[in-house]
Image (spheres, coloured by chain):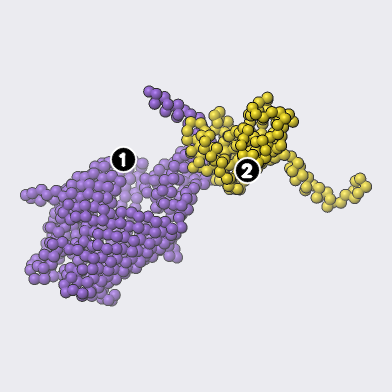
Chain colours: A yellow, B purple
């Protein structure tokens, strides 16, 4: 087959076919950020895979796995002081008979979704509304960082041991260095509110 | 009222943040298994609690609680559980997986007691376990079991599995220094002077005693275990000094233990044993004798009521050293009597029965039995007592039933 004056071989077709999904996945940003009304940002990460490996094995053994999520807004990529940040947590379990996942955000308010596939469950969990900090002007550059940690069952008791989620414990959890196998970190930026 | 409202608000808030998050909670538990042989090492109460979850809806918090308790009870490194589909639709199976520590060390007090006529007895034991191997080290000063006070050490190595799960191997070494009561020494003096009615088949008192005992344990069937081995024992006579004698014997013990599971309300257990020690000159023993010992115990529990019935019998044929002779009148037999008053040198024949009733922490018991020698007739004796018992700790007041006077004996301590 000749296209644009060049011979398109079967090898070229094969290489193009294989590399296209990779190129597409590289092209699509890992964090999707858009305005949600005048005072909020919606941060989603449908590309991030976290139900894998040991976590997935635990789920398929019938256990629940709890995750803690932090979305922070900073003025630079390496800044340690936050303009704003939001904490959330969710619990995932796997239905042994239906072979589908259930995700629960204990809240309050309680939100849950069942009969999810792995990608659908991951996408539902990593979809967060973040309030826009008052100090963030439309033209000011900022970065958004999403951090996900698998919770230790012992820490879980401390985090939810009081009425509501214990924010101090959550802050402490995210202040510690993450363990590679149990955390996901993704950063997007620089961004400006006026461009979103 | 404010406190109540605050607690109520807390409970409501907690309920809001701890919803049923495990989707498998709608399935019924079909079976629960504990991996390996650890199921047999669990206490009966914990075993029952585990089995009580079968037929109920899957409850993750209940299983998490049991996980912690199994870990604590077995001193395991970690305990986890896996859930899988059951054989029936909408049912799940639970399998507890236990990871043992590479080396596990436990220190316990298997026995500690005070007897107002016989004094103190104390045993401290340390056990280091690594896989199927365990090493036991015990320090003791015991004036309860035998006609002598034995003070010394016991060291033991055990391997639970040798080639097969049913076969185990053990080596035990004991080294004791003996103490004798005044009544025993007086009876010994009378014996040396040839005064009747002391039998002439009793050996002399001794200063020290050492024993080395290799043992093979074979599980013949689930409730039936056979121990077979040899005992190489030597002791240094008190008179004349520095003379060492040995009693080497073949040792065999057959044990039967069975839990007769009833309904949730009542349980029955049956324990029985027969042991045979045969000292023979083939093994280089200075003495030859055969010692038979039987014991049967039956326990019936219904709600908070427990009835225990036990029987012990024994016969020695031949000339046996004092540590082999039978004793009554201690913390478990003829409670209320002093063993040195009954027979300061022990006997070569024994028969004893006991009935005990417990309600919660309260206990009441009646013991009857006799210890005697071949050359003399048996004198039956009995005693009764009351006490309190909780978590291994016990205090009891026992009375010998005899004409004329009442002399209560106080027995207090743990694990006897």
Viewport quadrant of the C terminus of chain A: top right
Image x and y of residue B338, in percent: 15, 55
* Left or right of residue B284, residue B221 in this image: right
Q: Chain of mark 1?
A: B
Front one among A160 and B209: A160
Image x and y of residue B51, in percent: 42, 44
Name the outermost residue toward the top. Answer: B1
Where disc 2 sits, the SS reads strand
* Left or right of residue B71, residue A20 in this image: right
Q: CA distance from mark 2 to mark 1?
A: 54 Å
Kindly identify which residue carries mark 1.
Answer: B303
Kindly identify which residue carries mark 2.
Answer: A184
Q: Which mark is residue B75?
A: none
Say whether residue A116 is visible.
Answer: no
Among the 4 quarters of the image, the one containing residue A37? top right
Q: Residue at x 18, y 49 (%)?
A: B410
Q: Classify 10 Å Cα crowding around label 1: few (below 14), some (14-19), many (20 and above).
A: few
Image x and y of residue B293, in percent: 24, 62
Image x and y of residue A102, in percent: 58, 37
Say whether residue A14 is visible.
Answer: yes
């Amino acid at each position: 087959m000749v296209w644009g004056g060049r011979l398109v071989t079967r090898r070229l077709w094969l290489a193009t076919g294989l590399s296209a999904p990779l190129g597409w996945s590289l092209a699509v940003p890992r964090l999707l950020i858009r305005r949600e009304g005048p005072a909020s940002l919606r941060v989603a990460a449908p590309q991030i895979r976290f139900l894998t490996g040991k976590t997935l094995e635990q789920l398929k053994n019938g256990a629940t796995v709890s995750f803690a999520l932090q979305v922070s807004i900073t003025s630079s990529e390496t800044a340690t002081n936050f303009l704003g940040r939001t904490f959330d947590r969710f619990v995932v379990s796997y239905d042994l008979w239906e072979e589908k996942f259930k995700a629960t955000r204990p809240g309050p308010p309680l939100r849950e979704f069942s009969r999810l596939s792995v990608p659908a469950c991951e996408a539902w969990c990593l979809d967060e509304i973040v309030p826009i900090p008052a100090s963030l002007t439309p033209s000011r550059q900022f970065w958004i960082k999403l951090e996900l940690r698998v919770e230790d069952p012992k820490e879980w008791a401390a985090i939810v041991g009081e009425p509501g989620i214990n924010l101090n414990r959550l802050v402490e959890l995210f202040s510690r260095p993450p363990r590679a196998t149990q955390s996901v970190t993704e950063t997007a930026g620089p961004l400006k509110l006026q461009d979103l | 009222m404010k406190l109540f409202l605050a607690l109520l608000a807390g409970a409501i808030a907690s309920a809001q943040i701890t919803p049923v998050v495990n989707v498998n909670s709608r399935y019924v538990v079909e079976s629960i298994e504990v991996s390996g042989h650890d199921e047999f090492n669990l206490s009966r109460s914990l075993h029952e609690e585990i089995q009580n979850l079968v037929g109920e809806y899957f409850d993750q918090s209940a299983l998490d609680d049991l996980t912690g308790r199994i870990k604590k009870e077995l001193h395991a490194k970690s305990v986890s559980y896996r859930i899988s589909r059951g054989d029936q639709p909408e049912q799940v199976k639970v399998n507890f997986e236990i990871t043992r520590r590479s080396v596990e060390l436990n220190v316990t007090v298997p026995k500690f007691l005070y007897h107002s006529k016989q004094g103190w007895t104390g045993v401290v034991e340390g056990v280091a376990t690594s896989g199927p191997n365990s090493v036991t080290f015990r320090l003791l000063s015991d004036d309860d079991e035998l006609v002598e006070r034995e003070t010394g050490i016991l060291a033991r190595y055990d391997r639970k599995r040798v080639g097969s799960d049913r076969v185990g191997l053990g080596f035990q070494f004991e080294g004791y220094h003996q103490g004798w009561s005044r009544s025993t020494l007086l009876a010994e003096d009378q014996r040396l002077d040839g005064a009747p009615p002391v039998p002439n088949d009793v050996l002399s008192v001794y200063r020290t005693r050492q024993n080395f005992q290799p043992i093979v344990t074979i599980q013949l069937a689930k409730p039936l275990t056979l121990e077979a081995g040899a005992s190489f024992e030597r002791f240094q006579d008190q008179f004349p000094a520095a003379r060492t004698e040995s009693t080497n014997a073949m040792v065999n013990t057959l044990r039967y233990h069975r839990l007769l599971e009833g309904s949730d309300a009542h349980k029955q257990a049956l324990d029985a044993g027969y042991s045979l020690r045969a000292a023979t000159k083939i093994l280089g023993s200075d003495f030859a004798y055969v010692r038979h010992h039987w014991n049967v115990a039956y326990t019936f529990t219904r709600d908070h009521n427990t009835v225990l019935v036990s029987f012990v019998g024994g016969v020695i044929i031949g000339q046996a050293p004092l540590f082999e002779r039978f004793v009554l009148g201690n913390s478990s037999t003829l409670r209320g009597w002093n063993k040195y008053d009954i027979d300061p040198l022990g006997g070569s024949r024994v028969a004893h029965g006991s009935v005990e009733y417990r309600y919660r922490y309260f206990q009441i018991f009646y013991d009857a039995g006799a210890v005697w020698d071949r050359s003399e007739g048996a004198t039956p004796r009995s005693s009764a007592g009351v006490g309190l018992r909780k978590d291994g700790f016990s205090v009891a007041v026992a009375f010998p039933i005899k004409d004329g006077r009442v002399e209560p004996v106080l027995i207090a301590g743990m694990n006897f």
